[in-house]
Amino acid sequence: MIKIKSLVMLTAVALVGIVGSIVAVNIGRSAPVAVVASKPVVAAPKALDQDPELVVAMQRLGLDYSKLNLRYNDTVVRDGTSGVFIGDAILISKSVPPNKLDRLISHEYIHYIQSTNPDTAKAFYPYLEGLATNDAWLHNRLKNYYNGSVNVCSDTGCDIAAEAQAYACTEMPDYALSPDFVMFCNKWLPQRYSLFN
Ligand SMILES: [Zn+2]
């Protein structure tokens, strides 16, 4: 009898202990939540580093540069290239002649579009692989990529179609391209025809 009685008491103590700990946990959790709710932590937006001269060029070309870093850089840009799109930045070599700046920026901007709108851009990759093989001018333009002297791997992948897309939009006339691909180029490069003047 005594044994049973003390067992019941022990069980009761254990239950109180469990309930007590649940209450304690609830109190412990609710207090910091209230603090967080009253003082929300909002990360400050990261300031973009945009060279004023390159901003003027983006405006002239009607391009959306609201999320892009735009810098002159001769450290990253080398090995036969004059510009690069990397991460969230378009980097341009200081050695680029003024009359080639718009075309180069437009080329790198197409790489930016490949990263921000991959489905739209990649839908043309099979077409562009064929164009890069069959169009003599484009094939020659890509020779540094075919022979490996320029690394085609970037944030947007290792596909030569990505390079073909950037060159075709910025250096090839409409008549050498399919109508729907011309529409793609003109959509993202609203001043595209100024590149051919
Ligand atoms: Zn490129």
Image (spheres, helix red, strand yellow):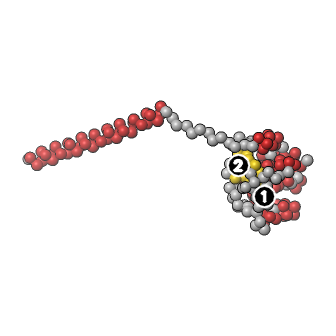
Outermost residue, bottom side: 147
Query: Residue at the spot x=85%, y=51% of the render?
Result: 97
Q: Nearer the viewer, residue 180 or 92?
A: 92
Q: Are marks 1 and 2 in contact (CB under 8 Å)?
A: no
Q: Amino acid at mark 1?
A: Thr
Q: How many numbered marks appear?
A: 2
Q: Does residue 160 sit above or below 54 in this rendering? A: below
Q: Quadrant of residue 143?
A: bottom right
Identified at 78% across, 68% down, the residue is 147
| Amino acid found under the numbered disc labelled 2 | Ala
Q: Residue 99 shows which numbered tag? A: none
Q: Is residue 137 visible?
A: yes
Q: Is mark 1 within 8 Å of ligand 1?
A: yes
Q: Which residue is mark 1?
A: 81
Q: Residue furthest top?
A: 38
Q: Position of residue 166 (x, y in %)?
A: 79, 54
Q: Residue at x 32, y 39 (%)?
A: 24
The residue at the far left in this view is: 1
Relative to 172, residue 35 above or below:
above
Figure quadrant of residue 10: top left
- Residue closer to the observer: 132 or 86: 86
The front one of 188 and 27 is 27
Mark 1, other Cα within 10 Å: few <14 / some 14–19 / many ≥20: few
| Residue at the spot of label 2 | 89
Quote the CA–CA distance across marks 1 and 2.
15 Å
User: Residue at 8% across / 46% down in the picture?
Assistant: 2
Q: Helix, strand, or loop for circle 2?
A: strand
Q: Earlier in the sequence, mark 1 or mark 2?
A: 1
